Amino acid sequence: MKTPGASQGQSASELISKRIAELGDWRGETLSRMRKLIKAAEPDVVEEVKWRKPSNPAGVPVWSHGGIICTGEAYKNNVRLTFAKGAALKDSKGLFNASLEGNALRAIVIHEGDEIDEKVFKALVRQAVALNGSGKSKPARKARS
């Protein structure tokens, strides 16, 4: 059986590992560390590679479980983890620091030297998995007083 997002005989996990190795700097190390935390938080996570195109032949690493948990992208100056349903997650520790204005997405942008609270990050991943399993995708509305 072929893994979703796989091509040319390589599994999505192999393609993600290749992408991390190609980065060869702090961005690869960061993406690798975050990948390990995602897998630790949800051992049954599915790795995929989506949105492959000529301008981005490597595609985008995606971690899913009953729906997309988050994507992981490396840019020149940062690594960005975008949670598909981040707006519906409780982020009491303030890990989300980008895409805060939308109704669905939330992102964690990590710059070189930034520290991420691993316990809090894993809790966000577990929340995203639970939300995917619940069938809900919108943030709860606050009751009017």
Image: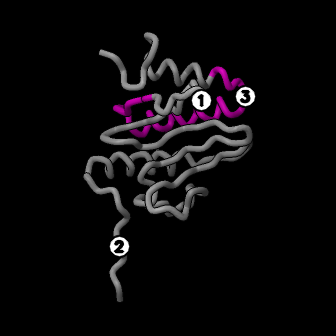
Residue at screen point 65% across, 46% down: 110
Nearer-the-camera pick, 26 or 98? 98
First-in-chain label (2 vs 3): 3
Q: Amino acid at mark 3?
A: Asp
First-in-chain label (1 vs 2): 1
Measured in 3D between alpha carbons, the distance from the residue under mark 2 to the one under mark 3, in whole angstroms, is 42 Å
Q: Is residue 4 above or below residue 93?
A: above
State which region is magenta.
21-48
Measured in 3D between alpha carbons, the distance from the residue under mark 1 to the one under mark 2, in whole angstroms, is 37 Å
Measured in 3D between alpha carbons, the distance from the residue under mark 3 to the one under mark 1, in whole angstroms, is 19 Å
13 sits left or right of 100 in the view: left
Q: Is residue 110 above or below residue 3?
A: below
Q: Which residue is mark 2?
A: 141
Residue 68: percent from left, percent from top: 39, 42
Q: Amino acid at mark 1?
A: Asn
Q: Which residue is mark 3?
A: 25
Mark whose residue sits in front, 1 or 2: 1
Q: Which residue is mark 1?
A: 56
Q: Secondary structure at mark 2?
A: loop
78 sits left or right of 128 in the view: right
91 sits left or right of 64 in the view: right
Q: Mark 2, residues whose alpha carbon is within 10 Å: few (<14), some, or many (≥20)? A: few
Nearer-the-camera pick, 31 or 102? 102
Residue at screen point 64% across, 36% down: 74
Q: Quadrant of residue 27?
A: top right
- Residue 40 is inside the magenta segment: yes
Mark whose residue sits in front, 3 or 1: 1
Q: Mark 1, residues whose alpha carbon is within 10 Å: few (<14), some, or many (≥20)? A: few
Whether label 1 touches label 2, CB < 8 Å? no
- Residue 113 is inside the magenta segment: no
